[in-house]
Amino acid sequence: MNKNKITLEQLNLKAKYLSKLTLRKLFEQGEDRNKYVIGFDEFHLDFSKQFIDDDVFAGLQKLAKECDLTFKIKQLLEGSVVNKTENRPALHTALRLPESSRMFVGDSNITSYVHEELRKVEKIVSKVQKGQWRGFSGKPITNIVNIGVGGSDLGPFMVVNALKEYRVNFKNKLEFHFVSSMDGTQLSKILNSINQEESLFIVSSKSFTTIDTFYNANTALEWMLKACTNKELILNQHFIGVSANKVKMAEWGISTANQLMIWDWVGGRFSLWSAIGLTIALSIGYSGFKELLAGAHSMDLHFLNEKHNCNLPIILGLLGVWNTTFMGINAHTVLPYDGRLQFFPNYLTQLEMESNGKSIDNNGNKVSYQTCPVLWGDIGPNAQHAFYQLLHQGTQRVSCDFIAPIKRYGEDKQLKSQHELALANCLAQSRVLAFGNNAISSKSDVPSHKYYNGNQPSSTILIDELTPYTLGGLIALYEHKVFVMAAIWDINPFDQWGVELGKIIANELLDVIKVTDPLMNSFDSSTNSLLKFIKDKN
Amino acid sequence: MNVAIIGNTLDAYVAAVSLASVGNRVVLSSGFNNTDLIESSYLHNEPELTQMLDMAEKSSNLTVVNDQQFDSKNFDCFWLFYKGSSQDQIEEQIEKLSSENPNSKFLLTTTLGVGTYEQLESKYIDMDLEIAVIPSFVREGYAISDFKKPDLLLIGTKSSKFIALISKLLSEIIERSRKVMFVSAAEAEFIKTSICSVLASRLSLINELSGLAEGLNIDINTVVEGMASDARVGKYYLQPGCGFGGVTLSREVNNLLKLLSETSSSGSSMLSAVVETNNSQKELLFRKFWQYRKGKVSGAKISIWGASFKPNTSSIKNSPIHEMIEAFSSQNCIVSVYDPAASEGLTSAYSNLEQVKIAVCKEDAAKDADALFILTDWDEFLRADYFQISKLMARPVIFDGRNMLDYSEMQELGFEYFGVGRGRPLTEIIDG
């Protein structure tokens, strides 16, 4: 992680010392903990309820310096080859650059490619918006079905759900559907509820070879051909492809006009800003999509230019490293107090765990420290009735991110009061998690089963209002947080070799499940026995 | 009696000349500056009206003035005719007239729909005025007889004094009317709107049936003939076509839809479907062409005959022409439109669209076209020389949105003919 052992030792010592203290003690030591509050744009980050003091805060910044964080950020944003195992840059930030900017990969100014694809997105959105994208029978499209998995699903799905209030009133009211799972559960349900004449499938896959997506896309195509056997017409009017692989798109049958490009230098989980976000643009309109990009771009500039001690992504990233590597807290939960962000924690599970769930450093050596914690989350108020029990009285140390917008519901008093209730709960929970029973003034003794230990550290992110712009900023904030952690841990956040082997083995097993030949005992005894059980039943 | 008629609609003219012809002293004032000006085609279509207008003016029972010339003193009542969607304009008139004439009586014939009277009454509850509602059932082309001998005359007021006044004013009409109903103003509004809803529903239903008939290779015109002979069904508003337009029907149905969504949380499932079916029907012919060309329509030359929402009017309000032009131009087609009366309206609506041309005659529109679309059943289109037209076109293909042409005759002339609910089903083409 860091060649300078002194900084690490100092931080380790500090962690040992602070572990014996309580958060209450830190707050009672007389220092002004409001210094651990920073703001940028419409974001307000309070990390005063973390186990830190001035020494830790300074130590973490020293660590960042010794890990060349500033240089690494610059490398990321300038398009250096930061993804070493795949020998390519990770230029998701280039996807939200204004058209006038220039960004080179090799000899090519990729900003012009990016905006060329954005214009195609805009054109498609406009045609669908006006009710002029026609299905095979000439009827306008009313159902958008996004077929994709992982980064081609989680990002668009999360954003489309979070920004429902910003849906554009199209001439024909659009319904959005998402299909990811290979088992067909989602797809069969959707195909039973929509009609062929008015459905448009967006097939997104960076490689255009993802087996999950192909099984779903093939089923969708067969279903379409049941309504109209003219395959050329069906492919022209009902299937759009988004991929980095033109050849594969064409091979499958996506017509040239319906091919939208992404590029090798965009990771799937960082790709919602590209044509992968077509579903988002169809939902909130092209101008709403541009707002999302603008919000993210603004966070990029903050990340690049702001000093470390008031740089939101850097602080979130350093706190993540602090909690995991030094404080030994290996679980992290994200708790939005706003139902619109229901799928944000789920989105982050991929972003953080697929990026930083690594144990080999950039030099190919096994790391000797803890990296990415287990991450999960849910809408805070619902989680209060589910897993908060563990947070408050369990044996696991868990760090938390509370997220809430301040303004919501305009003039609707009744709903506004519900939002106020949620905000009150958000603040109450972070208090109880930090201070336990000491959060209440009553001094009376409580029985042990009613005792709250507290000392679970948390950060609170408040946003003025949830809009396409601020959501763009929020997502970019976490993307960069992930990068900061990876930079300190000296791991590559942009590859995902850990998901490959399972695919190969699944292919072998699929052959065995499909053939009627007697079973050869070619796997381990457990797998052999499971296969036998399945085949005996079929 | 002395009556002031205010409005610039066909109904206002008809009421003015009819009342003047039976000895009332009538002043007709244009009023409502912002409403549609009366169209000269109204007078062409109502020969009796022109004649009566001359006679009434000669007899000096009728004076036609403009808004500025109008002197509101000494009238027994004011009859306001308004064809628009702004209640403010009605209120402005009522307030102006009643401030000049305390104790005024107003008859209202408007397209504002259910709830208008109630709103006006509550607004003017403290003012010294009375309001009655008399809905219009006047059809273009039959205006005088519809007014003088209506099937139904609705007199909407509960004031017995006002009823007496109206009865005296309309005594000849009451005598000739097949049915007169003295109802409340709100009931009068409701009856009128309900009639329109039924008519609109019939049109959307027959259009839905025509889609089914086409799929089964059945001629919907034959079906309609059979249906119409059943007295319970009757023949009116049963012609399939490419959607209804105009002001009255569309507005009344929308008024009712709005009212339903305001007063019931579940809104209307039935009327919404009627409107949705009609909206979809307006681009039916585009979809047929799309299917005919298997989706390959880009660059096609399209000829459209008829743009007004019905024959004998220049109004293109809510006409299917708008949906058709939008659909074709979005697919990069070149459109040439001809309408005997609507050129002016078309020019002001579409002169900015490069791929739309307003043609000077049928032949001009049809030249080099890949298909001809008929949207309005003007008589002129019945009399066209289709042999010559077929020679002018690049491909002799007709999409007849009003089922006005003879299917087999067109085929004999070498046309491929597609109607609404008749002609060759397109499903077999598209799959091929």
Image (cartoon, rainbow, N blue to C red):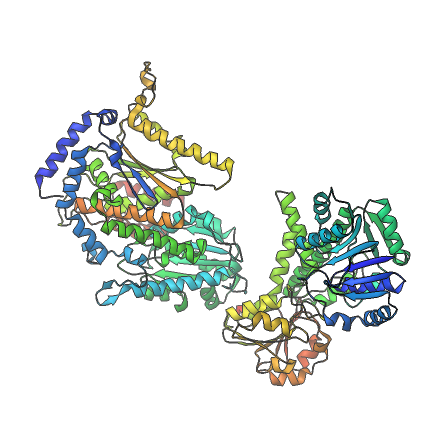
Q: Is residue B42 left or right of residue A339?
A: right
Q: Is residue A318 left or right of residue B111?
A: left
Q: Nearer the viewer, residue A305 or A364?
A: A305
Q: Is residue B35 above or below residue B125?
A: below
Answer whether residue B291 is visible to the viewer in this image: no
Q: Nearer the viewer, residue B228 or B196?
A: B196
Locate residue A315: give its quadrant. top left
Quadrant placement of the N terminus of chain B: bottom right
Total numbered labels: 0
Q: Is residue A223 left or right of residue A183?
A: right
Q: Is residue B296 above or below residue B385?
A: above
Residue B402's x, y, as percent? 68, 69
Residue A472's x, y, as percent? 35, 50
Q: Is residue B159 above or below residue A276?
A: above
Q: Residue at x 23, y 33 (%)?
A: A329
Q: Nearer the viewer, residue A111 or B43?
A: B43
Q: Residue at x 54, y 67 (%)?
A: B327
